[in-house]
Amino acid sequence: MTPSSGRSRLRRGVLCALALAAVLFIAAKARRGEPAAEREGPGVTSRFERPAQVWVVQRLAQWIPEEWLVAVGMRAAQIAGLFPGQLARARPLIMDDYSRMRRDPAFRRLPGVLSLLLSPRDPGHYFLYVPKDYDPAKKWPVIVFLHGWGGNSKYYPWWWSQFADEHGVIIVGPTFGHGHWERESGARDALDALARTTNTFSVDERRVFLAGQSNGGMGLWSVYARKPQAFAGLICISGALRAPEEAAEAARVPVLFIHGGRDANVPLEAGRRAARAVGAAGGRVEFLEFPDADHFVMAEERQKIYAALARWMTLDH
């Protein structure tokens, strides 16, 4: 054996050892992270109704830093020419939010679930955020939040966490592929996550609200229609109606629309048409427009949305 071939084998051996060590390290983190999903009480948790449906590769991939995947995904979308102006504005805001998220130990430890985006299985995952001052002796309102086409991420429970702590609201964030909530299994997952939360925590069942962003804002009508008695109101963010007949069903409860005036994904007029249709069907509608915001209005106008939600949720619903 020549010296060069010996060095080559040594390099391969070192690389294999490092790769194995990395896999074992990530697997150990995954095993340590799983029991936290069963913890009850304040804070954020990641929960699976059917954990056996999660593939090993996906479980390991949960420990790849989510912000890396988000940054790469947004950059790739820009290069592909998908709404480059909106992404150019949103990317630094969202990355700055991830930087702040890293300073929160609970969210830093929380595994991401973007690996489930393309999963052929449905493990019934959802994020749960319980306010810091949660007390089971009182009843707590709930917001069920439906994510959009880009999949669920821990960015969403982090986004809601400040609002939840300040206003005493439990946040339930189910996961369902690309956010096709109009499908029967998507609606089932959302309602199952709510049911498990209601059975575990002290919930004010008269003040449960259903919210959705983008695809979630397009699909919340279908979820609501499957169990309208469960919800006191609907919050449609950067969304619209999928079908005209959805307006009559939605008119049974108050509806808050939140939309960016520069939205290139779901145009502002689509949101306005949806609001007019629900209003024409007899619904109590409020339309909140942010003229300088776009499809990523949640990142652009977070504090203003918090204030609007807090006011709207205290109305007589």
Image (cartoon, rainbow, N blue to C red):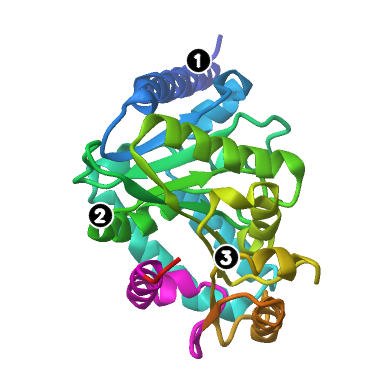
| Residue found farthest to the bottom | 291
Question: Whole-percent x and y of residue 239?
Answer: 63, 70
Q: Please give the name of the residue rendered at 36% of the width and 26% of the height, measured from the top-left corner.
A: 33
Q: Please give the name of the residue rendered at 27% of the width and 60% of the height, measured from the top-left corner.
A: 167
Image height check: is 2 above or below 185? above
Disc 3 target residue: 253
| Residue type for callout 3 | Val
Query: Which residue is more in the foreground, 124 or 278?
Result: 278
| Residue type for callout 2 | Asp
Disc 1 target residue: 6
Q: Nearer the viewer, mark 2 or mark 3?
A: 3
Which type of secondary structure does the marked residue at label 2 adopt? Answer: helix
Disc 2 target residue: 165
Q: Earlier in the sequence, mark 2 or mark 3?
A: 2
Question: Whole-percent x and y of residue 284?
Answer: 56, 76
Q: CA distance from mark 2 to mark 3?
A: 25 Å
| Residue found farthest to the top | 1
Q: Quadrant of residue 106?
A: top left
Look at the image and say whether residue 299 sits in the magenta stretch: yes
